[in-house]
Image (spheres, rainbow, N blue to C red):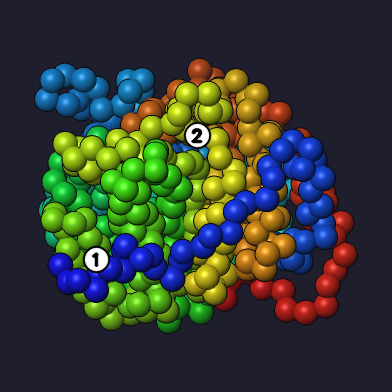
Amino acid sequence: MSRTRLAGIALGSIFRSSKRPPDFTPEQIARAAPEQVFPPGFLLGAATSAHQVEGGNENDWTDWERSTFPDGTPHIHDRTESGLACDSYRRFDEDLRLLKELGANAYRLGVEWARLEPSEGAWNQEAADRYRSWLDQLAAAGIRSMVTVHHFTLPRWVSADGGWQTDRTIDRLEAFTRKVAEAFGARVDLWCTLNEPNVVGIHGYLKGIWPPGLKDEVQCAWAIARQMKAHARMARVLREKTGKPVGIAHHVRVFQPATRSPMDKVVARVAEDFFNDSLVDCHRTGRIRLMVPGKVDIDEAVPDLKGSYDYLGINYYSRDHMKADFKEPSMSRQFVPEGRPVSDLGWDIYPEGLYLLLRRYGRLKIPIHITENGISDESGALRADFLRSHLYAVEAALRDGVDVRGYFHWSLMDNFEWAEGLRSRFGLYRVDYTDPRRTRTATPAVATFQEFARKLARAPAVEGKRSWGS
Ligand code: BGC
């Protein structure tokens, strides 16, 4: 590990930002005036992913859902499977109705690799026609599409041959992307290559709680690095074939030292560097740099990575308090202090964090889309305030000059929440999984979203360029 790289972590990257958030008191949030600040053409929408909503998929995740850990504990906490999920594959008209009802002008949706390419080189024309018709319907409704090419799930023929443990997956995802670009390019407004390479690496290859269930620091780092290499190649293909803006969705978090102890500060900084900054910074440096002192040290130039984000997508949910603990694989324990407001999953509700991260990554000087932000809230009592306070964070960042172009709430409706199963509910709309029609019902946050959409629609038109990508 080079001394310069360690010093880079210690001193902080270009992303260091000391600005404190403004007040997030209820009174302050009530004084929000988005119509004065949000730029014309701002994308206000919701997000889903293919496997989580479509139903009827067969991929590495469905295999994982049906199996257990060696001690017999189910992989999915509530013992559910994605199964029919929201049945969106057959009920897209319902989803479109919800988007219209919300007043959304954008939708982030995914295509399912295993469905479109069920065996290597095959192409499922029926599925392609269906996705194409969804994109046509969105366009007809004036709703911009952001299409995620790869959101966690791998076809079995890819996972059986090593998944993110082999470079062959990079080649195969590039080849799949070429077909996706040819099939849908004319209809897509914005591309999102991959979703959250860091989360896939950590859950699947370090903690062993997602497929393929490995616990290996080095494999984790390489899984992340390979996904970034795939992103670089996908971005080139999508730009060449479609000319539409291309980005990636990175999960970024606030890592706060639990105490003033220097060791807590160091582990918070290492987590920030590994989990957040190193991936965001690929666009600027053209290198993949992943380091955990004494354990992992990847530093590789990757052709096509430099400048590969037309926009930066950030998925923001929460903050971690970091306590040094060198017995843990991540060298720390993460926790939420007593008394903090939390979601059903125990995640700290910290809207200030969205402001801080927008300021931080605004320094990249490219457009930013918030590709995901939401809350697991079964009662539906927390979501409206969550939405209001996080949109307030976006407003504050815009006031400071950060170039934010879109906000996609996670999620349009409840869906299959990976290892948590169906019980964890992130939807603006509640889905009734006991009903074969998968009826969707508005939660109280729908009215908040609608009110916000109305304010933006009423905002005075400003002369000038109206764009949402690059
Ligand atoms: C993922 C989504 C997931 C959400 C809530 C993100 O990490 O992209 O697929 O449902 O978080 O956990």
* Residue 66 horizontal/vertical position (percent): 25, 28
In the image, 60 versus 259, the foreground residue is 259
Q: What's the residue at 63%, 68% (across, down)? A: 403
Assess disc 1: are there few (<14), some (14-19) or many (≥20) residues with their C-alpha within 10 Å of its C-alpha.
some
Tell which circle, 1 or 2, labels the residue nearer the N-terminal end.
1
The quarter of the image holding the N terminus is: bottom left
Q: Which mark is residue 348?
A: 2
Amino acid of disc 1: Leu
Secondary element type, mark 1: helix
244 on left or right of 230: right
Residue 178 placed where, x, y %? Answer: 36, 71
Mark 1 or 2: the one toward you: 1
Few, some or many C-alpha atoms within 10 Å of disc 2 (few <14, some 14-19, many ≥20)?
Answer: many
- Quadrant hosting residue 337: top left
Element on which disc 2 rests: loop
Residues tagged 1 and 2 counted as in contact (Cβ below 8 A): no
Q: Position of residue 390 (x, y in %)?
A: 64, 45
What numbered label is drawn on residue 6?
1
Residue 125: in sight, yes or no? no
Would residue 357 be found to the left or right of residue 128 on screen?
right
